[in-house]
Amino acid sequence: MAQAQFQAETSARGEFVRQANRFTGRVTAESGSAPGEGPDEQDRWPLEAGRYRLIWSRACPWAHRAVIVRGLLGLEDAISLGTVDPIRDDRGWRFTLDPGGRDPVLGIEFLAEAYLSTDPGFQGRVTVPALVDTVTGRVVTNDYPQLTLDFSTDWAPLHTKHPHLLPADLRPEMDALMREVYEDVNNGVYRCGFATSQEAYDEAYGRLFARLDALEQRLRRQRYLFGDHVTEADVRLFTTLVRFDAVYHNHFKCNRNKLAEMPELWRYARDLFQLPGFGDTVDFDHIKQHYYGTHPQLNPSGIIPAGPDLSAWIS
Ligand SMILES: N[C@@H](CCC(=O)N[C@@H](CS)C(=O)NCC(=O)O)C(=O)O
């Protein structure tokens, strides 16, 4: 069997099995803690404008989703943003884009410092997105699916825009679709790319394209996944689709066809791309640098392909 990119997250059958999210704190007005204090006994942190900092990589689809939702809800002034270098070294995500190589608010050089000061025994992958408390320097959460749901709900007192990304009447149907999209598409591309057996790859590839075919059919009937209105389900699908032809098609061997060859999905992804908060948060350069530059088992040379021509996204 091939050497795994992430040994600790590879099953005996060669499947990529993503690690659990280590930190699952919630920021909510329901917290029993006063402003400035740490979490209550249920790991609920007080809701405070300006206190928490979202750390993202422009390359990462999971972090990208948090930044899009933050922007759509107008939470930019309430939650500050720190950006890591698209290339990790053996100490992980670095703040080398900032003056002096340190995050100007947290004062750290590596995101790992925040993880280890929160859990000195942490041995997993240090991941983005991470919501970090600027008072204690601790990681509140790296639980990316819960984070964006909380942005819509618990953070509502601080919203300055009201796009209704999570309409209550659609929640059961949205949760079901977002789960399928996560398993087969968002994480499905990783399960293709990080598979170390033919069998595991074939299975992930089959599920990915079957799901994309089903989504293609769904989008023949409507502009977005739930009609004429953008929801969080669209944000979650978008961050994978926008990376598809640039990296997943080639680097992760998701190559039955390109996104640009699926007419409805291509129309849909470009439609979203044109909306404020979507295309203006996409950085194809960081995306390509990161994927091709940090998975040596998949791309030992580290060479970044020149293509594809991405100009079609904005034409
Ligand atoms: N928190 C999740 C998902 C977030 C995630 O995987 N982020 C990637 C970037 S897209 C990351 O930070 N990877 C760091 C690494 O692989 O060392 C996890 O632990 O699997």
Image (cartoon, helix red, strand yellow):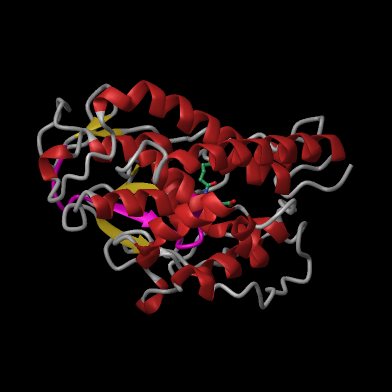
**Does residue 65 show up magenta in the picture?**
no
Where does the magenta region start and end?
Answer: 47-61
Between 70 and 85, the one lying in front of the other is: 70
For the question of whether residue 117 can be seen, the reply is no
- Residue 138 horizontal/vertical position (percent): 33, 45
Check the image and name the residue furthest to the front.
221
- Residue 55 horizontal/vertical position (percent): 37, 55
Q: Residue at x 80, y 38 (%)?
A: 202
Which of the 4 image quadrants contains residue 261? bottom right
**Does residue 60 show up magenta in the picture?**
yes
- Residue 43 horizontal/vertical position (percent): 29, 28
Relative to residue 76, is residue 142 depicted above or below?
above
Relative to residue 110, is residue 195 depicted above or below?
above
- Residue 232 horizontal/vertical position (percent): 35, 40
- Quarter of the image that includes the N terminus: top right
Q: Residue at x 47, y 35 (%)?
A: 22
Task: Give left or right: position of 59 versus 159.
Answer: right
